[in-house]
Amino acid sequence: MSPDREAVLRLLRSHLDTLGVAWEDGARPGEVVATLPGERKLRTVVSLLVRQRALRVRAFVIRNPDENHEAVYAYLLRRNLRLPGLAYAIDTDGDVYVAGQLPLAALDTQALDDLLGAVLGACDEPFNELLALGFLSAMRTEWAWRTTRGESTANLEAFAHLLRDRPAD
């Protein structure tokens, strides 16, 4: 027998509070939306939806790439092989998400830690590589615009090695 939804929601909210993770109730019954802090991707918004037998998780990774779709998707598919109980997916707009589920019977604070850590890793670790693969032309244009006007390039510094002395497309 699965734990009841309210008990799972109490566990989930309490554990997020213990971790110091910001959260709010989602738009759907049984949904909690948490915001995980990252290093490359500044924050990852995660939907945690308690269903009858499983906790479903979904987090936005990046919007539909501007270019290099095949390389982006091949990169994500290779990473799928290493994800514990999660997988990358795209929606009808081509935006990239990571999604998965955990049986409620297996849910405890350690399982939640593992799940949240895996989601954060799946969104944060490949973020710069995904941006470089899918948005390099736009970043080059932005870099050129900022440097010719003397504007700050701080938000592009992680990609400076790809952008310096290279023309915008």
Image (spheres, rainbow, N blue to C red):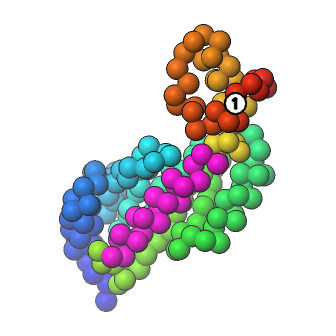
| Residue 7 included in the magenta stretch of the image | no
In front here: 30 or 112? Answer: 112
Q: Residue at x 34, y 59 (%)?
A: 31
Q: Secondary structure at mark 1?
A: helix
Q: Can residue 95 be seen in this snapshot?
A: no
Q: Quadrant of the N terminus?
A: bottom left
Expressed as whole percent of the image width and height from the top left, the position of residue 96 reads 60, 51
Q: Amino acid at mark 1?
A: Leu
Q: Residue at x 61, y 71 (%)?
A: 82
- Which residue is tagged 1? 163
| Residue 122 included in the magenta stretch of the image | yes
Task: Look at the magenta stretch and give its main secondary structure.
Answer: helix
Query: Which span of residues is magenta-colored?
Result: 110-129
Would residue 62 be found to the left or right of residue 111 on screen? Answer: right
Q: Residue at x 65, y 12 (%)?
A: 148
Expressed as whole percent of the image width and height from the top left, the position of residue 162 reads 70, 36
Q: Residue at x 52, y 20 (%)?
A: 152
In front here: 58 or 164? Answer: 164
Where on the picture, by quarter, is residue 63?
top right
Q: Quadrant of the C terminus?
A: top right
Where on the picture, by quarter, is residue 133?
top right
Q: Residue furthest top?
A: 149
